[in-house]
Image (cartoon, rainbow, N blue to C red):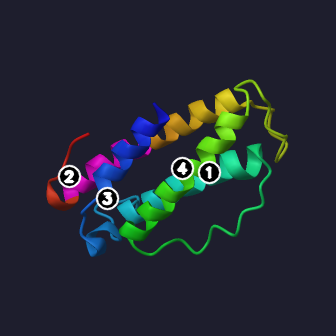
Amino acid sequence: MLQFQRESFVRKLTGVDEQAAATSPVRSGTNLLWLANHVADAETIWVLERFAGQAEPAIEPHVLNVAGALVRYQELWPRIDAVVAAAGLDEECPPFDGRPVVNLRWILGHLLEEIARHAGHADILRELIDGETGR
């Protein structure tokens, strides 16, 4: 299901005009380029950094075009998937920021929700930009 949501998100941004993707058609300022960087950041932070304890290079600056941001995101998938495959779903994430302890199952559920929610945002933004919609 996570892979399905990842691919759905990528499809929503594929082929969009780069300039339009970096501007926002909504009052909040959310744009497709920001979303593309954000979903990659979310998987990196939750799985690689927090769960696996892998030191990652600074996330900033973000990739400045959608095509590059999507490549960055897709290149993360095998690393994320390898960590998940090597762990048990009930394996706990080391504590961070004074938050309650969560396990890998919770992290994957959170990422599934995060990516699906942002895919919905991307669908609306893309429709506002150029009329493209779909799964």
- Please tell me how crowded label 2 is: few (under 14), some (14-19), or many (20+) other residues with Cα within 10 Å: some
Asked where in the image residue 20 lies, by quadrant, the reply is: bottom left
Residue at the location (80% across, 39% down)? Answer: 99
Marks 3/1: CA distance?
Answer: 34 Å
* Picture disc at residue 129: none
Report which residue position mark 2 lands on: 127
Q: Tell me residue 35's x, y (percent).
A: 44, 57
Q: Tell me residue 60's x, y (percent).
A: 61, 72
Report which residue position mark 3 lands on: 26
Against 49, is 23 above or below?
Answer: below
Report which residue position mark 1 lands on: 79
Q: Earlier in the sequence, mark 4 or mark 3?
A: 3
**SS class of the residue under badge 1?**
helix
Asked if residue 82 lies left or right of residue 37, the reply is: right
Q: Which residues are magenta?
A: 116-128
Discs 1, 4 touching: Cβ within 8 Å: yes
Q: Earlier in the sequence, mark 3 or mark 1?
A: 3
Against 128, is 9 above or below?
Answer: above
Q: Is residue 62 magenta?
A: no
Asked where in the image residue 1 lies, by quadrant, the reply is: top left
Amino acid identity at mark 1? Arg
Q: Earlier in the sequence, mark 2 or mark 3?
A: 3
- From the viewer's perspective, is the residue at label 2 or at label 1 nearer? 1
Q: Nearer the viewer, residue 100 or 103?
A: 103
Q: Tell me residue 109's x, y (percent).
A: 58, 30
Asked where in the image residue 107 lies, by quadrant, the reply is: top right
